[in-house]
Image (tube, grey):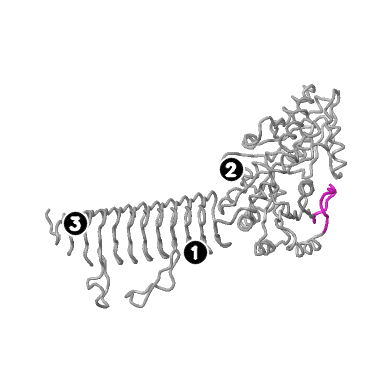
Amino acid sequence: MLDKNIKIMHAPVEIAGQVGLISSQLRKYGYQSGAYNFFISYLNYKQTFNTDAFELMQIFENSFDHFDIYHLHNGYSFMDSYKDLELLKKAGKKIIMHHRGNDVRAPERARKGDNYVNPYVNTESSHDAEKIHSSLQLFAEVADAAIVQDHELYEYVKDYYHARNKKVYILPRLIETEKYIPAYPGKTNKPLIVHAPTLPKFKGTEQIEQTIDRLKDKYSFEYVRVEKMSHEEAVAVYKRADIVIDQILCGAYGNLSVEAMALGKPVVCYIRPDVRESLPEGLPIVSANPDTLYDELSKLLDNPDTFKNLGAEGRKFVERYHDVSVVMPGLLTIYKDVLSERSSSMIHPTAKIGKNVVLGQNVVIEENAEIGDDAEIGHHVIIKKDTKIGNRVQVGDLSVLGKTTSKNKKMARKPGAALTPLVIEDDVRIGCNTVLYRNLLLKQGAFVGDLSSIREKVVVGVDSIIGRNVIVETNTLIGSRVTVQTGCYVTADMIIEDDVFLGPCVSTSNDKYMGEGNYPYKGPVIKKGAKIGNNATLLPGITINENAIIGAGATVTKDVEAGKTAVGNPARVIK
């Protein structure tokens, strides 16, 4: 159970009466909670403290010593700049962002996702798409968790939060069902159809009323559009309704549907198929979009005897799924989870993380690092500053990416002060316990095995394989489709062309005088298609030409011509 000493602040706006209702229920459960609203509307919800932005800032400044959890709503905080979020984090406060709809319903994502298409949705009332994107990136960074009311909104925010190993909870809209006495439709020759659009374009009011006009040619009914009324006045109209139409575009039902079902009314609202699959069984809402609304309303008007049964099923659904007695324990569990969790990853605010990225535990991502879409980063991985990681890259546990070179006085070659970032292109696979330095390029499809290390000023070509426990030293070029098997030592200043094969434990060297003097370093050159057998040793400066073969255990001290085979110690050409 959540500690009764925990204090929760809800701010800064009221949304459909939900914010004040949550706060009042928390107080009934014995918690200290306040709900504050700076956006005053004609709906006149009465369970929040209505204020203005200036006074709300004063309340915020005096709140640090009082509240433990800041439960924010609809993509807003106390400051337009969101600098208050940084202050809250520094003060050790827990932050929950409760996304409500148009703060996250960006046009492109609302119309099409991985498992849904919605050609009807209207996003004119949504925040600007770029603002939604940047805000979600920020919220995912600083908030401890997010809450949404249904699967529709979950699809829009999950990638942002999951990329930072944060949870997104689905908490259904809540209602005090006992305060809504059912008024089931009775027999009538002239049913009353009610529609209440707070945002007409979003709800599809124009299409609804066009359909209503067409139906009047065939059916006798009354239609009422509820607007500019207080919430109490609107509910009084809902009580008289025989059919309530909520929204027919966005693909999920709103607060009007919940209230109408609680009153025992048949409800018409478009439910996106993927959203319906995520809901409990028994949802009695009649799903209709602009293409099907005429037919669905016709069926209802042809069968008025079904009104009462649909209304009764709606009431049962709300009691089972939306009543405060069902929803509030779930919220308390969320609070408890958020308070008990410690941040398992450290992600710099300037880091950019793509869609569908999976992060393991205790990942560190430093400033200006970038990770593309669909990447998988293992546990305890450190991604150093400026590192660029492409799409669909996989990184094993305990790896370090973008390491800066070290030096001491004895080193003959001092690393450069300014090294470009590590760049890992799309579809690269990196094993566990690998160390990859700055100024390294891994081209598309490359593979780096466990326990390997690749130094700076190295290029690894397309689809090449760097096997387990391989060391690749600095200033080396490895071509495409190269295979470097387990335990090889690839010296500095070396060139390995395309389609070369190095068997296990091949060793190469670049210093003819073994550290005795300031002589130029030159590693071996291995030309295209050459094959080097297990445990062979290649001495400095030699060239293994195209398609040559070096036998296992050979020590190569001079060039080998193209297509020739050399074996032995020292190696000699046998054919």
Determine the CA span between mark 3 and mark 2. 56 Å
16 relative position to 444: left or right: right
Under circle 1, the secondary element is loop
Q: Which mark is residue 113?
A: 2
Most foreground residue, 436 or 391: 436
What amino acid type should be assigned to the residue bearing mark 2? Gly
Determine the CA span between mark 2 and mark 1. 30 Å
The residue tagged 3 is 553
Under circle 2, the secondary element is strand
Most foreground residue, 42 or 315: 315
What amino acid type should be assigned to the residue bearing mark 3? Gly
Determine the CA span between mark 3 and mark 1. 42 Å
Give the percent coordinates (x, y) of residue 96.
Answer: 67, 53
Magenta: main secondary structure:
loop
Q: Residues within 10 Å of mark 2 (few under 14, many from 20)?
A: few
Q: Residue at x 79, y 32 (%)?
A: 212
